Image (tube, rainbow, N blue to C red):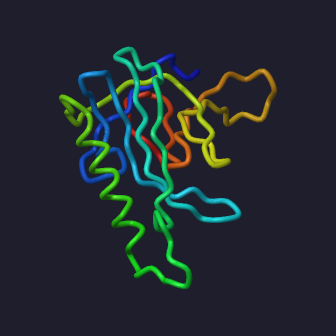
């Protein structure tokens, strides 16, 4: 089954889609996530969409290093995740009329710091010409597929 034009994402409090919903300007998806690669980096992400699920913009920042590192200073364990959660809380507090809940968004792609962020359509079948049957949220690695009920696989 091909990827729908608008992909539903279910709000699951206390899980990886616990910070999604609607606000006065449309819809949002926010998270603290690691991106794997040559280096493991921690990011704070807020994607904003209009009411019809079109990507408006993204606020993405790295949280795995102090904002102004002191030469020779070592960070205490847990400082980066705490900093990330505080930044995320500030971004969410800035959304007028914010309500957590289900969203429905269109696929999009943003590259920041050499890392892909977005809801990217893909296909499982290796046969050329096959339709995309999967939408993957990067770098969170949440996969959405038929029956397109908003639930994800990891």
Q: Quadrant of residue 131?
A: top right
How many marks do you count on the picture? Answer: 0
Image side of residue 71 versus residue 103, left or right: right
Query: Residue 108: horizontal and vertical position, in percent?
Result: 56, 27
Q: Quadrant of residue 9?
A: top left
Of residues 46 and 14, the one drawn nearer to the viewer in this rendering: 46
Query: Can you name the residue that lies furthest to the right here?
Result: 128
Image side of residue 148 versus residue 71, left or right: left
From this view, report whether residue 35 is shown above or below residue 73: above
Query: Residue 67: horizontal and vertical position, in percent?
Result: 46, 63
Q: Quadrant of residue 99?
A: top left
Of residues 134 and 43, the one drawn nearer to the viewer in this rendering: 43
Query: Residue 33: horizontal and vertical position, in percent?
Result: 46, 55
Give the residue displayed 37% in from the left and 42% down from the top. Answer: 30
From this view, report whether residue 83 is shown above or below residue 18: below
Give the residue displayed 21% in from the left and 33% down from the top. Answer: 98
Query: Residue 89: horizontal and vertical position, in percent?
Result: 27, 50
Image side of residue 38 versus residue 13, left or right: right
Of residues 46 and 120, the one drawn nearer to the viewer in this rendering: 46
Look at the image and tell me in which quarter the N terminus lies.
Answer: top right
Give the residue displayed 50% in from the left and 72% down from the top. Answer: 69
Give the residue displayed 47% in from the left and 29% down from the top. Answer: 57
């Amino acid at each position: 089954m091909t990827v729908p034009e608008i992909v539903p994402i279910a709000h699951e409090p206390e899980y990886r889609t616990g910070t999604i919903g609607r606000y006065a300007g449309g819809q949002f998806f926010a998270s603290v996530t690691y991106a794997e690669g040559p280096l493991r980096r921690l990011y704070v992400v807020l994607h904003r969409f209009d009411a019809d699920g079109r990507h408006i913009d993204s606020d993405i920042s790295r949280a795995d290093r102090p904002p102004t590192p002191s030469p020779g200073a070592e960070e205490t364990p847990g400082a980066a995740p705490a900093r990330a959660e505080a930044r995320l809380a500030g971004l969410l507090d800035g959304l007028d009329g914010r309500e957590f809940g289900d969203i429905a968004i269109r696929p999009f792609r943003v590259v920041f710091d050499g890392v892909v962020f977005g809801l990217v359509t893909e296909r499982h079948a290796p046969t050329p010409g096959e339709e995309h049957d999967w939408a993957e949220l990067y770098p969170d690695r949440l996969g959405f597929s038929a029956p397109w009920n908003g639930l994800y696989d990891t």
